[in-house]
Amino acid sequence: MTGDDEFTNRLIAFGLSEKEAQLYLHLLKFGPKTPSPLAKSLKTYREDVHRTLKNLIDKGMVRPSLDAPTIYAAVDLDIALDSAVKKHESELREMEARKRELQELSAHEQFRPTDEVSTFKLLKTTKDLVAAAVTSVSSIKQELLYVVPPEMLVIASLFGINAEVKKLIDNGGHARGISEITSSCVEAAQELLDIGEELRHYDQYSGVYFGVLDQKVCFNSIRNAPAGRISLSEPIAILWTDDSTYAQYLSSTFELLWKEAVPAEERIDELLSERPKQESK
């Protein structure tokens, strides 16, 4: 993987689409440009460039000039990333506020919950998954099990999921996870170990991704996002359900994978030992 590819993948994990990440990196490297040379360099159409530029302007990562023809420049990286983080934090705060409002309303209603009927719902974007994961993990008391792609380890670190996992562990609960640990997620994997989670590496995992919470609630991927392209806006298909029978089945599947996986510490040491060699090339 080249330096540009790694940088682009990090931008994608931060919430940009692939086209947005490539265009922003191009402006960072080669300076301000008008749409025509951008379209030529990126081998795409002017209309496509205009749409991508508009999205980047909305995200605070690109700045247009006031004169004609309009020239587009990349906003300083630190400023752009701070802006993106604040936007995501604002969105998560709004979701938490809606959650509290619903909880207050439900306290005044005569609802009749039952364990006999299971609920199923489809999560369509990574943003939906993050919001559901934060809410679900914050409510469990005993155990979290999961198998996720490496990009999800980074997203969990950035958007508050790890903070909820740490609370679970601090309160006496347990968390175990499996992922294919790559060079792009070493820091995120080490963060999980540091908060007391048990993590293992499964080399070239190609199965279904899932999570199980307290043997009751579970997430199960119906369609996996393309490798390296997970972002908050990435279309996915994740089934959420509180069907305990299905949760127990996924738990059994997890235990089989756990036996085949290797401790994350071994994989992290292996990747870190390779870095000096890569840097010297």
Image (cartoon, rainbow, N blue to C red):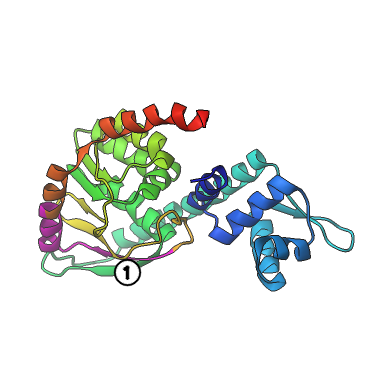
Q: Residue furthest front?
A: 281
Q: Residue at left 47%, top 51%?
A: 92
Magenta residues span: 235-252
Where residue 166 sits, quadrant-wise, is top left
Q: Residue at left 42%, top 52%?
A: 96
177, 183: nearer the viewer: 183
Question: Where does the image place residue 30, in percent across and percent down from the top left?
Answer: 73, 48
> Along the horizontal axis of the image, is 77 left or right of 187?
right
Examine the rendering and report whether any part of residue 91 can be seen: yes
116, 44: nearer the viewer: 44
Q: Residues within 10 Å of mark 1 (few under 14, many from 20)?
A: some
Question: Where does the image place residue 40, in percent across and percent down from the top left?
Answer: 72, 64
Q: Residue at left 26%, top 46%?
A: 203
Q: Is residue 85 above or below residue 249?
A: above
What residue does disc 1 label? 122
Question: Where does the image place residue 224, in percent across and percent down from the top left?
Answer: 34, 63
Q: Is residue 192 above or below residue 122?
A: above
